[in-house]
Amino acid sequence: MMQKIMKTIIILAILIIPLFASTNSLITLPHIETIDSNGVPVFYAQDTLPQCTVYVSIGVGSLYEHATNAGISQMAALVLSLGGSKNYPNINEYIDATGGRYTVSASFETLTISMRVHQDEAAQAFTILADVIANPLFETQLIHTARFMLKQQIQQKQDDPMTIAMEKARQYVFGDSGYGAVMTPESLDAITVADVEQLWKKYIVKENVRIGIVTSLNKENVMQQIAQLTDALPHGEAVDYPVDLQNAKNTISTKKIYFIEKDIPQSTIVIATVAPSIKSNNRYALEAGNYILGGGSFNSWLMDEIRVKRGYAYSTGSIVRMRKNTGLFLAYAQTSVATTLSTIEIVENVLANFAKTGPSQQQLQWAKDALLKSYIFEFTSLRDIVQYYMWLDYNKLPVSYIQKYPDGITSVTNSDITRSFESIASGYIIVVVGNKDVKQQLDAGKINYSVAK
């Protein structure tokens, strides 16, 4: 235990001191070695603890889906989590017996298999992971179980107006694929065992996979063990997800309102539009600006105008997500039925004014300080750092991005923010989830809106 504590202190020390000593300082991280194993990038960090953690990250997720198969990535992940492989169908029993951990998860852009065991179990862990890759257990009963569980998740979402509004907003902006591919009972019913097997065959190839390892094993041992894992991967084409940006831009130019009727006492409002990709030159300005606009709790513009000054909303804020090929911006508020239309107007005005004037110098400095100080928490463990390297590789960002981020945030100016938010404020759609009284208000105000399906 003492050894683990000392190691954590050392890692934090070498991270924190350079980060805040100067805006031009580099962040010093523990050594992460990039190894090529049969054409697959492997990111290796040697740990002092007698353990072995392996991540197999595949470039596939909900952004690779469309309306007819939405949810297939989550289904594949859940099936593998429940079943494992053909030669190791009881993978969870083995992991439980050894005190290890085995998880499979799917996100917007990746499906990740992770296994963590004692170093004495490392050789067996690599053998099992290789079999999961080569012989995944996609059988009918597991598909049925996963489908039932995912339908339960969908049902639970229906109790959350914010989730409903944000999912619908994504659909309206991006259409039937990518961000617009929202999992439904119908899309899940359409997915067969053959579909999941085809997904696996298409995406689990050397050119579409990256591996991370944090272990006490030395590099030579790791190279021997990792070979069987990368040998199990066939060659294939790297697959990327498409984005129809022109169609999305056409949609957001309308500033259309979509209404979803739900018998709830409050209204939920979401404004949604396209944000740039992770490689955009506007990334730092958008991140700093969003923190001031709605990401910074009580100090944000939206919170001040909607809740502090008027008491209209308990929850309000904004989110910006920039990913490999595109991004998404959301501003939201939950308010009473009586103040729904007023709140929509305030959110729009705040967004327009922010794009016109930008923040004060004091607000900008507050945001920079907060973002820089929180950046350290991306690197609090060796596992975090290895996964960050994998994230960089997926997004085709150089390792130098780690050091450039603090300088990028520090260099943001007011004009950078106003320029970046001009496009955000110029086009968007609005989703309102509320009861029939809200609909009557929209009608009475002669507001042009569409009833969401």
Image: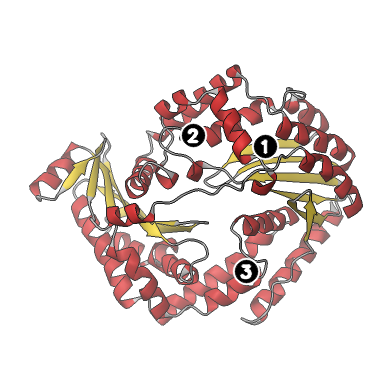
Asked whether residue 314 is in view, the answer is no
Amino acid identity at mark 3: Tyr
Q: Residue at x 60, y 66 (%)?
A: 375
Residue 214: image x %, image y %?
Answer: 79, 51
Q: Residue at x 28, y 47 (%)?
A: 431
- The mark found on residue 401 in the picture is 3
According to the picture, the residue beneath numbered tag 2 turns out to be: 71
Characterize the local packing of mark 1: few (<14), some (14-19) or many (20 or more) Cα atoms within 10 angstroms: some
Residue 177: image x %, image y %?
Answer: 41, 43
Characterize the local packing of mark 3: few (<14), some (14-19) or many (20 or more) Cα atoms within 10 angstroms: few
Query: Who is closer to the viewer here, 366 or 86?
Result: 86
- The mark found on residue 103 in the picture is 1
Amino acid identity at mark 2: Gly
- Disc nearer the start of the sequence (1/2): 2
| The furthest residue to the top | 141
- Disc nearer the start of the sequence (3/1): 1
Circle 3 — which element?
A: helix
In front: label 1 or label 2 = 2
